[in-house]
Image: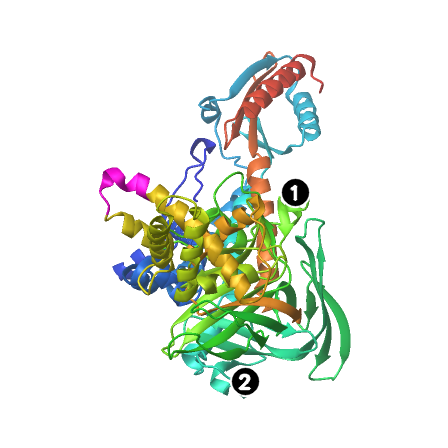
Amino acid sequence: MEYKTDQNEAVTDTRGIQLSTRRTWLADAVELLSSMRFAISLLTLIAIASVIGTVLKQNEPMPNYVNQFGPFWFEIFNRFSLYTVYSAWWFLLIMGFLVLSTSLCLIRNTPKMLKDMRSWREHVREQSLRNFGHKAEWHSTVTRSSLLAAIGHHLNRTGYQWKTVDKDGATLLVAKKGAGNKWGYIFAHAAIVIICVGGLIDSDLPIRFQMWFMGKVPFDGNGIIAKIPQQHRLPLSNPAFRGNTMIPEGASSNTAIIPQQTGVLIQDLPFTIRLKKFTIDFYSSGMPKLFASDVEVTDHETGKMFSSTIKVNQPLIYKGIAVYQSSFEDGGSRLQLAGYPMRGNSLQTFPLKAEVGGSTPLAAMAGDNEYTIEWSGFRPFNVENMARNGSDVRAVDANKTFNEKFSADLNRHLGSAAKNANNKDLKNVGPSVQYKLRDKTGQAREFNNYMQPVLVDGDYMFLAGTRDSPADSFRYLRIPADDNDSVVEWMRLRAAMSDPLLREQAATRYARRALPASMANAQQLQSQLAESARKSLTIFAGDHQQAGFVAISRFLEQIPAAEQGKAADVFMKILNGSLWDLWMLAREKEQLPPLELTEKHAHFLQLATTAMSDAFFYGAPVYLQLRQFEEVKASVLQVTRSPGKNVVYLGCLFLVLGVFAMFYIRERRCWIWLKDDGAGTAILMALSSQRKTLDFEKEFTQLSTELTHIAQSGAAS
């Protein structure tokens, strides 16, 4: 801004520095860079970029963006580096130009402001004062010298500084108050420069310089960190970085991982961190309350060792490097599982031992395909919002994903844990295991199975989640828990459904049970009903194309529309009845006693039927149930060196001081012209301020009243 003194009013000038040079392009460039309009334009661009960086998740794996936006928009957004906005070259360039532009504005305006603060503006005439909007005149019989003393004493009491100037046979008293208001503009503009410089220091700029000029390249392979070549490692002298390190209990780390678009960079640390113990405290609802890592630090240079506890918002700071508690992961928990076939008529289970982070080969139950299980995660507790409010929790469906609300609850925990500490709907539903099933072609599908049955809509279900891509939400197959809180009865019924011989026997038994032999034509009717029951079971059992309720729907579409409702009714009655006999035959085959047909068992059969229909879309040859586990925790620590942090704090202090000065310090200037007129003294007063507010109007009225009293009495009130 530029300040003029015409009638002592401030005039804004948005032009920049005017150079006297024959090179027009240079003069225009300097004028543009140092102008207020250019700085405001840059601030607007930074604000827009910050909105993009806030709305669009940053530094996610590239496949996530491809799945979210599609190949076309992914490529366009990638060209503009929208996935790493704050480290994009154009964002850093804008920041650099903003620093340059604001610095030039300061260089241009600060001397003028300081000069204006020191100036008394005593070069005014009597006629100029009469042109002010806020002026007043009096006549006093008191002598000029007495009035000067009284007025000066009053101005001192009200906080004004003043001086007198003799001119044109009169005395001009010049007073000013709140001249420090100009510091607000200086501090506020300086704060922008300081904060931007601090941000640039802590940005990816130092790492980018090393990649541009020192041959550093991201590492995009697999291997032991200690053996990764030097071109992928950043030195101890790296001035600024922000990375993560995951340390299992009992293990140690002396490096941090800095993710990049095409891989990772390894940042060597001047010390080694060993995790002795990771502690999690919980609220009564089961939500995590506290994460804490008990660590032992060893200095590489001196060999010094010391212990410390790192908590959320309580970092460890050593040698200019801050280590924050970020989150926690599994550190290689050891699991024992039971595998249940999901194809064919076998009920034989098999044991599995696994370690999170490892893989286990698995021979498929059908065909010649070979599978590998990649154990990706284990959670000893899962706090979920199980209040469904009457909404349906869908199982796996061919055309419709799981109820989004439920899958979001199962996969997301947002916000502070403390705000949900007393939420009665939050329940700890027990451990879960997450893994990928990869076939020999490299295609993988991800699964998430809960160890214990979960109460859903009043029924206890074993939830078996599945999804095709990490960008998707899990869809859950709901397997009903039997009388022993296990999946055994459902698995028995599933295996029986895949056995054509058992289906034939179940259809015959159902027909005999539904039509007693005492009926007329009983044998013929039983034969017809048995054939209908066999066909119903066969359609429901399905083939490789379709099964379950989808197959039934396709079958009913062949019937005239007017009769479909009645046919569906009959079909489902026959199916439900024959399924009971199929279940009992499966139990007899294993020499188990038959169950009593109660409402509870009938309801279980209904749920089991729905689960068998949904199981066709489960997409796995086996169902793996967690039986036992030995948890190994791992702490995820964020390691940062941010020398620009203190610079940003200084800039924030300047910004607070600047805003306070601009908004709460008002500059006022007062001129009082005293001139002898033969009968006493003529007094002319003018008051000016940069901002005409109600407070200024009130102050002018009050000062006029007080000076009127002084003019009449010759003494300060």
Question: Where's residue 41, x and y in %?
Answer: 37, 49
Task: Provide the residue designation for mark 1.
Answer: 424
The secondary element bearing badge 1 is classed as loop
Tag 1 near tag 2, CB within 8 Å: no
Position of residue 698 relative to residue 109, above or below, is above
Disc number at residue 595?
none
> What amino acid type is highlighted by mark number 1?
Lys
Which circle's residue, 1 or 2, is located before the other in the chain? 2
Q: Give the residue type that dot 2 points to.
A: Ile
The residue depicted at 64 percent of the width and 59 percent of the height is 381
Q: Position of residue 96 (x, y in %)?
A: 43, 62
Q: Residue at horizontal 54%, vertical 71%? A: 339
The answer to which of 84 and 637 lies nearer the viewer is 637
The quarter of the rendered structure image containing the C terminus is top right
In this rendering, would 663 be left or right of 424?
Answer: left
User: Residue 692, percent across and down?
Assistant: 50, 27
Specify the label residue 224 is tagged with: 2
Asked if residue 30 shows in the view, the reply is: no
Q: Is residue 372 above or below residue 695?
A: below
SS of the residue under disc 2: loop
Boundaries of the magenta span: 559-567
Q: Quadrant of residue 167?
A: top right
User: Is 113 on the left or on the right of 44, as rendered?
Assistant: right
